[in-house]
Amino acid sequence: MKLNANEGVPSKQECVSKVRPITDALYVLNGKWKLPLIFTLRENAQRFNEILKSVEGITPKVLAKELRDLENNEFIVRKVFPTTPVTVIYESTSYSDSLNGVLGELYNWGEQHREKIRHSMRDRKRP
Amino acid sequence: MKLNANEGVPSKQECVSKVRPITDALYVLNGKWKLPLIFTLRENAQRFNEILKSVEGITPKVLAKELRDLENNEFIVRKVFPTTPVTVIYESTSYSDSLNGVLGELYNWGEQHREKIRHSMRDRKRP
């Protein structure tokens, strides 16, 4: 792919633009925690310590940062209830509905990939 | 969520397992480059320098590492042709077909999210 705009030869702009929506999406959903967190909070609203248990491996520090990011991008809201002590609940927003398709496909792919790995490990064990 | 297996109370295992396929998927597809690279190579097989131009922002060092990872996970193959100098082409495998749904959904989501951001920026500019 050349940089000059010869006829029929895609310019750099054209080459880049096709993959752009994918990189755009991953720019917002970056890292290994955002999609699992949205998925978990879409199942049910939860408190900080509940999320910590639901999403295996995340640390409190990282969770706090990720929840802030998700709130800034309007995927979740943080609701404070005036109990004693105050109750803080994290809830998914209606905008997180837009990720239903992505989450569904990723879920199915994760399941089938796990099966594939399991099969290839079993095959490797055979003499 | 308690660890003991009281009836009706989900054990930690159960709480974790629902989100597991998502975290499994992201464990393999981690980072911001793997999905854009698979997407690009599924459009057409390319040489190293072509990929570097297609996927904006990636550095040669990171690209080399990511291509190795993708090869190890059987999403792409590296083909060497005995020309002078040798020609090396990176090509997506049939296993990368399994990511069609994920890539399609992510593509659509990326496009609509970009539109959302554009609208909210325009709204913010208004007095």
Image: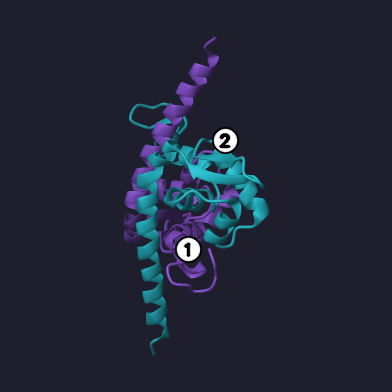
Chain colours: A cyan, B purple
The residue carrying pointer 2 sits among few (fewer than 14), some (14 to 19) or many (20 or more) residues within 10 Å by Cα, namely: few
Q: Is residue B90 above or below residue B36?
A: below
For residue A100, above or below residue B112: below
For the N terminus of chain A, the image quarter is: top left
From the image, tell me which residue sits under label 1.
Answer: B15
Disc 1 residue type (three-letter): Cys
Q: Name the secondary structure under disc 2.
A: helix
Count of all numbered marks drawn on residues in the image:
2
- Does the CB distance between marks 2 and 1 fall below 8 Å? no
Question: Closer to the camera, B98 or B89?
Answer: B98
Subunit that carries the residue with mark 1: B
| Residue at the image point whose x is 34% and y is 44% from the top | B104
Q: Let me know if residue B18 appears in the view.
A: yes
Question: Label 1: how many residues lie within 10 Å, few (<14), some (14-19) or many (20+)?
Answer: many
Q: Measured from the top left, where is residue A101 in percent x and y?
A: 35, 46
Quadrant containing the C terminus of chain A in the rendered view: bottom left
B33 versus B26 height, above or below? above
Q: Residue at x 42, y 85 (%)?
A: A125
Amino acid type, residue under disc 2 in the picture: Asn
Q: Position of residue B80 (x, y in %)?
A: 43, 60
Q: In the depicted view, which residue is nearer to us: B57 or A44?
A: A44
Quadrant hosting residue A52: bottom right
Which quadrant of the structure image shows residue A113?
Answer: bottom left
Using the numbered discs, state the Cα–Cα distance from disc 2 to disc 1 in whole angstroms.
26 Å
In-image side of A126 versus A24 (left or right): left
Most foreground residue, B6 or B126: B6
- Numbered circle sitting on residue B3: none
Q: Which disc number belongs to residue A72? A: 2
| Residue found at x 42% / y 52% | A43
Check if mark 2 and mark 1 are on a common chain: no
Q: Where does residue A61 sit, x and y in percent of width and height?
A: 68, 52
